[in-house]
Amino acid sequence: MSSRRIFRPLLAPLMAMALIGCASLAGAAEAPAPAQAAAQPMAPDTMAARVQGCTACHGVHGEGTDNDYFPRLAGKPADYLYNQLQNFREGRRKYPPMNYLVTYLSDDYLHQIATYFSQQRPPYPQPAKPTVSASTLSKGQQIVLNGDAGRGIPACAACHGANLTGMQPAIPGLVGLHSDYISAQLGAWRAGSRHAIAPDCMQQIATRLTDDDVTSVAAWLSTQTAPANPVPAPAGSRKTPLACGSEPQ
Ligand code: HEC
Ligand code: HEC
């Protein structure tokens, strides 16, 4: 659709913030006065209207965009997305446009947005073409599927699911993400700028990974084709090898 092209990378954040500003005001207000409603016949307070400010960066259905750092949201468990929106609001994750957008949104509102994106099922992007060596890819595959017991690194699949589509209620899928996004998140945990609810199992795992491990797992994950049925595994279908505050057992 040609209007997508208007959202040039630098313009997108500003336009998006302007849009969400409107959407959040509409959401905060009680039923609009009849005169207002009549003046804005094109802006009903539907979920699609509320998330309009998100779509420039995350895609209309949360499918993500070509930008390497803008993640897919669609199909991730609702409680995972909700935890992240709270993390941005309360500063446990730092990305100024996201921190700003959710500052004044209520828990209830964030929960509704999280549920909306968790229910979206847009197609996955084509997997990335490998840009690293075959040995780097196979090292990544080894860590994701089997971990490295000698270094206390559990298999990523032990929590993120055999198909890497996540596990209810709050572990995200790792398919359909760009390698730069995955590396940036693991880097943020290692640097202490991303935190999850304690005990923060991802912080423990990320700090056991070397730079080379991070490059390998991010590269391998980004080259995987999403499974035909990308739904997260049921809650409790696997016992997580470490305790995670966001995924109660
Ligand atoms: C200016 C671009 C931009 C806009 C607009 C934006 N986001 Fe984001 N969003 C990002 C980026 C970039 C990240 C990853 C930040 C990081 O590195 O932690 C992110 C992360 C997220 C995450 C965490 C995803 C994950 O898998 O951990 C959620 C949930 C989210 N955004 C929801 C929203 C919602 C809901 C809106 C609209 C209210 C929105 N975003 C608007 C850029 C944006
Ligand atoms: C013990 C369980 C567990 C294991 C093992 C695990 N993870 Fe996670 N992972 C989680 C949880 C829980 C979250 C959500 C944390 C939060 O709420 O921010 C998460 C989140 C992530 C995210 C953030 C995704 C996003 O959309 O922002 C990435 C990336 C990630 N894990 C990568 C990995 C990799 C790579 C491995 C293997 C080296 C791994 N994880 C192993 C539990 C685990």
Image: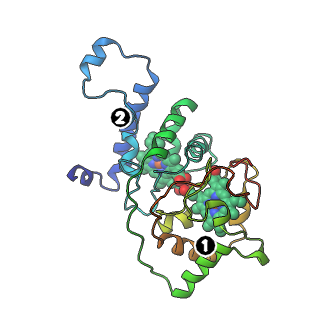
Q: Amino acid at mark 1?
A: Val
Choose between 53 and 14: the one closer to the eye.
53
Q: Residue at x 53, y 43 (%)?
A: 99
144 is higher (above) or lower (below) than 93: below
Choose between 84 and 154: the one closer to the eye.
154
Disc 2 element: helix
Residue topped by disc 1: 214
Label 1 beta carbon within 8 A of ligand 2: yes
Q: Amino acid at mark 2?
A: Ala
Camera-nearest label, 1 or 2: 2
User: In the visual, does 206 lie left or right of 9?
Assistant: right
60 is higher (above) or lower (below) than 125: above
Tags 1 and 2 in contact by the CB under 8 Å rule? no
Res. 175 in view: yes
The image quadrant that residue 19 belongs to is top left
Residue 195 is tagged as: none
Q: Residue at x 25, y 51 (%)?
A: 6
Residue topped by disc 2: 49
Distance from Cα at disc 1 to Cα at disc 2: 37 Å
Q: Earlier in the sequence, mark 1 or mark 2?
A: 2
Which class describes the residues within 10 Å of circle 1: few (<14), some (14-19), or many (20+)?
many
Which residue is situated farthest in the top direction here? 34
The image quadrant that residue 91 belongs to is top right
Image spot of residue 236 (x, y percent): 69, 51
